[in-house]
Image: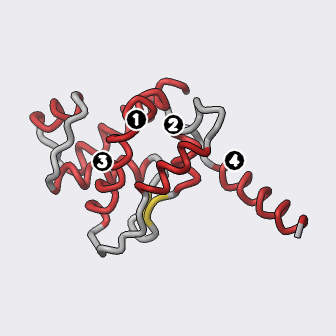
């Protein structure tokens, strides 16, 4: 039993160790690439700067693109919770709180939504509860 626990902890450490924490520079690069790829209008860019993310196809797919570039979401398998915890919980001593919030918001897509809608739904859920934490995670690195 102890051996199994040690192996699981080691695997978790390896998965987390492979994830590179992203910073504001990484976000700026991803934003630029995703804005071009998803044909985001200047009007939408202004809304995004104010953390106003309307529920439309362009915005949903833009968020999925950012999450994909940050290795936080996969269009087939969904949210990468360990990476989300590493990225968003980096300033927290106790990551259990962050993990609990992520697990509430990172659903398994039982609605069978398209991947853009799936990523956007999790994003909106998480920032509704943790916008300061999201903003802080980008300043750290």
Residue 73 % position (x, y): 44, 57
> Is residue 19 depicted above or below 8 in this figure?
above
Q: In which quarter of the image is the C terminus?
A: top right
Do the numbered discs 4 and 2 sit on residues whose CB atoms are within 8 Å? no
Q: Quadrant of residue 43?
A: top left
Do the numbered discs 4 and 1 sit on residues whose CB atoms are within 8 Å? no
Residue 11 % position (x, y): 75, 60
Secondary structure of the residue carrying tag 2 is loop
Disc 4 to disc 2, how far (Cα)?
13 Å
Q: Residues within 10 Å of mark 1 (few under 14, many from 20)?
A: some
Q: Nearer the viewer, residue 131 or 70?
A: 131
Q: Which of marks 1 and 3 is nearer the N terminus?
A: 1
Which disc number belongs to residue 27?
1
Do the numbered discs 2 and 1 sit on residues whose CB atoms are within 8 Å? yes
Q: Which of marks 4 and 1 is nearer the N terminus?
A: 4
Q: Quadrant of the N terminus?
A: bottom right
Q: Name the residue under label 2.
A: 22
Q: Name the residue under label 3.
A: 124
Residue at left offset 51%, top offset 39%: 88
Q: Quadrant of residue 26?
A: top left
Q: Earlier in the sequence, mark 4 or mark 3?
A: 4
Residue at left offset 59%, top offset 34%: 90
Q: Nearer the viewer, residue 70 or 89?
A: 89
Secondary structure of the residue carrying tag 4 is helix
Q: How crowded is mark 3: few (under 14 residues within 10 Å), some or many (20 or more)?
A: some
């Amino acid at each position: 039993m102890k051996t199994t626990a040690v192996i699981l902890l080691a695997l978790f450490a390896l998965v987390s160790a492979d994830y590179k924490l992203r910073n504001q520079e990484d976000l700026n690069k991803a934003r630029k690439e995703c804005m071009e790829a998803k044909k985001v209008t200047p009007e939408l860019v202004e809304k995004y700067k104010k953390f106003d993310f309307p529920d439309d196809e362009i915005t949903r797919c833009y968020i999925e693109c950012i999450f994909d570039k940050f290795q936080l979401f996969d269009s087939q398998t969904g949210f990468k919770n360990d990476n989300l915890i590493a990225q968003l919980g980096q300033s927290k001593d106790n990551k259990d709180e962050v993990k609990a919030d992520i697990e509430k918001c990172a659903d398994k897509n039982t609605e069978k939504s398209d991947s853009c809608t799936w990523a956007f739904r999790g994003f909106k859920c998480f920032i509704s509860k943790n916008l300061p934490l999201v903003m802080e995670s980008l300043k750290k690195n």
